Amino acid sequence: MSYFKTALLLAALTALFMGAGFLLAGQAGMLIALVIAAGMNLFAWWNSGATVLRYYKAREVPANHSLHRIVAELVARDGMPMPRVYLIDNPQPNAFATGRGPNNASVAATTGLLQLMNEREVAGVMAHELAHVKHRDTLIMTVTATVAGAISMLANFALFFGGGRNNQMGIIGVLAMMILAPLAAMLVQMAISRTREYEADRGGAEICGNPVWLADALEKLEVGSRRIDNHAAENNPATAHMFIINPLHTQKHDKLFSTHPNTANRVARLREMSGNTTASTVVTPAASHGPWSPGARSRPRPRSGRGSVPGAGSRRPGSR
């Protein structure tokens, strides 16, 4: 159902774009806008992954790094191609995936995420990102972001070329399009992003084998992202939809324009998947099982209090 919803939203975004071009300059405007959007999509499809990684100054980690090892175990468990693994020097806990598809994908996590999470929670987060790769969400989000940007560009053109004889709207219509078209495009883009996040949560839970690992990680991510700024993301909010949790503080009270679904709803769905619908238990590694592995079992234990940390005492990525 989520794939059908995504297809409908993409169709709505495309129709909105073509309609804006037609209203601005008739059939010629619609065709020109389509050609421009196709060119932008081709460029974004080919270069978006490397561009985003460069922007966040991500560095590729070697095969002996704990993050690389966790991702390698997850892809081996699911039979996926091995993506390139990157680390971003940023104190805010977060992660994202990028690339055109499973055969040329990259996954990245921040240093803040590795410092905050135990290995099973890191596995849950990276499984979520691998689900995005598996579902080709990175390509979908690149296309939606590019088309939404093209609609905004058309709206700006309307200010200068809205008086042409092919204009179907008149000056009032031009002004309305300048305001409403980018707003509608943004809403559709946000709806697609939210849909794909829920689907990636479900897929990530299947890849790592335990929905509670991702649920616990999301709870930590929600708190950590609110407390710690991500200045790079604030300076480039167009990349916010790529992250597992919204990295922006400027929109944290604006639910309508959030790029991500409510974290509590995501956690509730994951705990439902695990058969654990209460927040009174967390999953931590049993001492007898040693380092994390996808096949290792875990046991629930009650929270010891408000200040307790899920997974306290378990090995963190990068620890010796």
Image: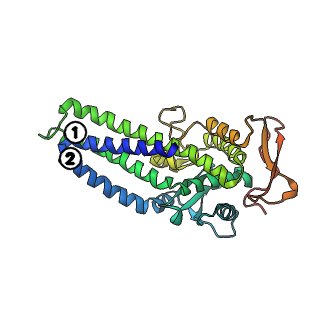
**Residue type pointed to by label 1:** Leu
Q: Is residue 43 above or below residue 113?
A: below
Farthest right residue in view: 288
Instruction: Return the x and y of residue 59 as percentages of the image width and height.
Output: 57, 64
Marks 1 and 2 close (CB-CB < 8 Å): yes
Q: Dot 1: few (<14), some (14–19), or many (≥20) neighbours within 10 Å?
A: many
Q: Which residue lies at the image location 51% right of the left edge and 60% below the top edge?
A: 53
Residue that carries the numbered disc 1 in the rendered image: 23
Total marks in image: 2
Residue 155 marker: none
Label 2 sits on a secondary structure element that is helix
**Residue type pointed to by label 2:** Gly
Q: Quadrant of residue 48?
A: bottom left
Instruction: Return the x and y of residue 284 as percentages of the image width and height.
Output: 80, 48
In this view of the protein, which residue sits in the foreground, 68 or 82?
82
Which quarter of the rendered picture does the C terminus lie within?
bottom right
On screen, residue 249 versus residue 289, left or right, reads: left
Residue 29 marker: 2
Q: Quadrant of residue 180?
A: top left
In this view of the protein, which residue sits in the foreground, 12 or 228?
12
Label 1 sits on a secondary structure element that is helix
Q: Quadrant of residue 41?
A: bottom left
Residue at mark 1 to residue at mark 2: CA–CA distance = 8 Å
